[in-house]
């Protein structure tokens, strides 16, 4: 009788064991552990009145946070308009939500420039700017990508993420909205969290 090479015999046993283990895993329901997304965190920036503003100044309210810049040709105006609509549609509940616009172009977005910009959409929107390092630190905390693109020294664009983040009363991440999410959809989610009807 022909003898089986011990190496191939061991290989066959390994393959059989792997197949059995894989079958067990496939038949076992997956278990997921809950955890908070690593989005958000401390920041220290400058408000449109020139005063220092930190994340702690918004405690006790939900926050609707977006990053952008005043020279943005399309995404930022569209999202700020949506943010303004959200505040209008919330009615009395709007007092429990702090809409925040953080500049990723602090070189051009001075407090004065930012003030005129956000007020054109809704006076309740808080505009924040700061030094380049402060802006970069805030963007990093929210996992926001931004990078200066083509153009000259003063005439350039900034590529950046286009998410709007909903944070809870302690500044922790709840969820986010993609670009062009309708105001009504955002209002529905905000009201659920305001009423305590949804947990994350």
Image (cartoon, rainbow, N blue to C red):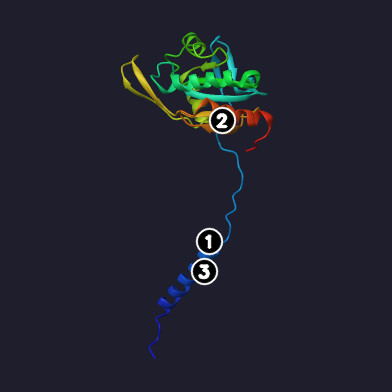
Percent of width and height locating residue 108: 42, 13
Mark 2: secondary structure? loop
Are discs 1 and 3 less than 8 Å apart at CB? no
Which one is closest to the eye, mark 3 or mark 2? 3
Give the residue at mark 3: 20
Percent of width and height locating residue 38: 56, 36
Describe residue 15's horizontal placement relative to residue 62 as left or right: left
Label 2 to label 1, Cα distance in Å? 36 Å
Answer few, some or many: residues within 10 Å of disc 2's Cα (few below 14, many 20 plus, some between 14 and 19). Answer: many
Q: Image point 57% across, 29% down: which residue?
A: 166
**Badge 2 or badge 1: first in the primary sequence:** 1
Q: Image point 47% across, 23% down: which residue?
A: 79
Label 3 to label 2, Cα distance in Å? 43 Å
Are discs 3 and 2 less than 8 Å apart at CB? no
Q: Considering the image in quadrants, where does the N terminus appear?
A: bottom left
Q: Is residue 41 visible?
A: no
Instruction: Quadrant for residue 4, please give it.
Output: bottom left
Dot label at residue 40: 2
* The one of 179 and 53 positioned closer to us in this rendering: 179
Label 1 to label 3, Cα distance in Å? 10 Å
**Badge 3 or badge 2: first in the primary sequence:** 3
Dot label at residue 26: 1
């Amino acid at each position: 009788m022909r003898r089986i090479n011990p190496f191939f015999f061991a290989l066959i046993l390994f393959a059989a064991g792997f197949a059995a283990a894989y079958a067990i895993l496939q038949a076992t329901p997956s278990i997921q552990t809950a955890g908070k997304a690593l989005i958000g965190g401390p920041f220290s920036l400058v408000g449109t009145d020139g005063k220092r503003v930190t994340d702690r100044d918004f405690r006790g309210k939900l926050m609707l946070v977006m990053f952008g810049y005043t020279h943005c040709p399309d995404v930022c105006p569209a999202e700020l308009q949506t943010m303004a609509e959200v505040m209008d549609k919330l009615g009395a509940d709007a007092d429990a939500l702090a809409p925040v616009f953080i500049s990723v172009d602090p070189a051009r977005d001075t407090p004065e420039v930012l003030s005129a910009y956000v007020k054109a959409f809704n006076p309740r929107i808080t505009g924040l700017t700061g030094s380049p390092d402060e802006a970069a630190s805030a963007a990093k905390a929210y996992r926001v990508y931004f990078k200066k693109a083509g153009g000259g020294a003063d005439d350039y664009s900034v590529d950046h993420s286009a998410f709007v983040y909903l944070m809870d009363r302690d500044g922790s991440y709840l969820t986010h909205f993609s670009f062009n999410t309708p105001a009504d959809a955002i209002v529905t989610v905000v009201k659920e969290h305001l009423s305590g009807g949804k947990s994350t």
